[in-house]
Image (cartoon, rainbow, N blue to C red):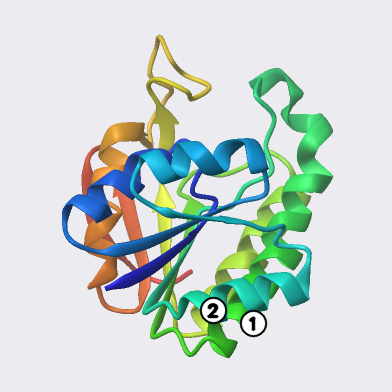
Amino acid sequence: MRIFIAGASGVIGVRLVPLLVADGHTVAGMTRSPQKAGMLAELGAQPVVCDVFDVDALAQAVTAFGPDVVLHQLTDLPDRAADLPAFAERSNRMLADGTRHLLAAAAAAHAARVIAQSISWELPGENGRAAYAEHERAVLGADGVVIRYGQLYGPGTYYEEEPPPPPRVHVDDAARQTEPALDVPLGVTLVVDDRATPASHD
């Protein structure tokens, strides 16, 4: 299977790429950072340097690869949890505009499936909740799969030393449980506490 991962250099992406490659899939890993292209190549992906907000370049990159599946692992989050409020607008833009652009590129490439990450816990801010709701509606409206991850913990996350309150999932388990989403029924899937289970739509 040919799998295009947008956000391949993120904490889930860097773990997911080698898992998919080891299972015989051909993987393109998209990052907006040229400095991370070499790392993605070492993991076994075909590196694609592209910004999701460059609509024409994105459509060209996805179409040129010809994916069966497009995996949306894009975020725009800070390195430190304390900086999250300052990144709220950027994160919401990624959820709205970034998702819309990637869905359009996947449609142009005739990808059979789009799988997009989301969250399984309630955000404190109304704007953030609305942004995730819009993001999920767009993916489900395109007959895609939404993965609602628990709060990630482990190396490279905001919770490296101590797990957060539930719902939660170790980042290694999150990557491992993402691969079955290639075949789950369309809709919402939960990846929480090392389990992937169907969820009813909100």
Residue found 75% across the figure and 66% down from its top = 97
Nearer to me, 158 or 165: 158
The quarter holding residue 56 reads bottom right
Nearer to me, 1 or 72: 1
Element assignment for label 2: helix
Residue found 70% across the figure and 58% down from its top = 131
Mark 2 = which residue?
Answer: 64
Element assignment for label 1: helix
Going by the numbered disc 2, the residue's amino acid type is Ala
Residue found 73% across the figure and 47% down from its top = 91
14 in relation to 61, above or below: above
67 in relation to 6, above or below: below
Nearer to me, 151 or 57: 57
- Residue 54 lies, in percent from the top left, at 78, 66
On screen, residue 21 versus residue 94, left or right, reads: left
Q: Earlier in the sequence, mark 1 or mark 2?
A: 2
Nearer to me, 167 or 1: 1
Q: Is residue 13 visible?
A: no
The quarter holding residue 162 reads top left
On screen, residue 136 versus residue 45, left or right, reads: right
**Neighbourhood count class around disc 1 (C-alpha, 10 Å): few under 14, some 14–19, many 20 upward:** some
Residue found 16% across the figure and 57% down from its top = 23
Mark 1 = which residue?
Answer: 104
Residue 198 is marked as none
Dividing the image into 4 quarters, which one contains the N terminus? Answer: bottom left
143 in relation to 123, above or below: below
- Residue 29 lies, in percent from the top left, at 48, 55
**Neighbourhood count class around disc 2 (C-alpha, 10 Å): few under 14, some 14–19, many 20 upward:** few
- Residue 140 lies, in percent from the top left, at 50, 78
Going by the numbered disc 1, the residue's amino acid type is Ala
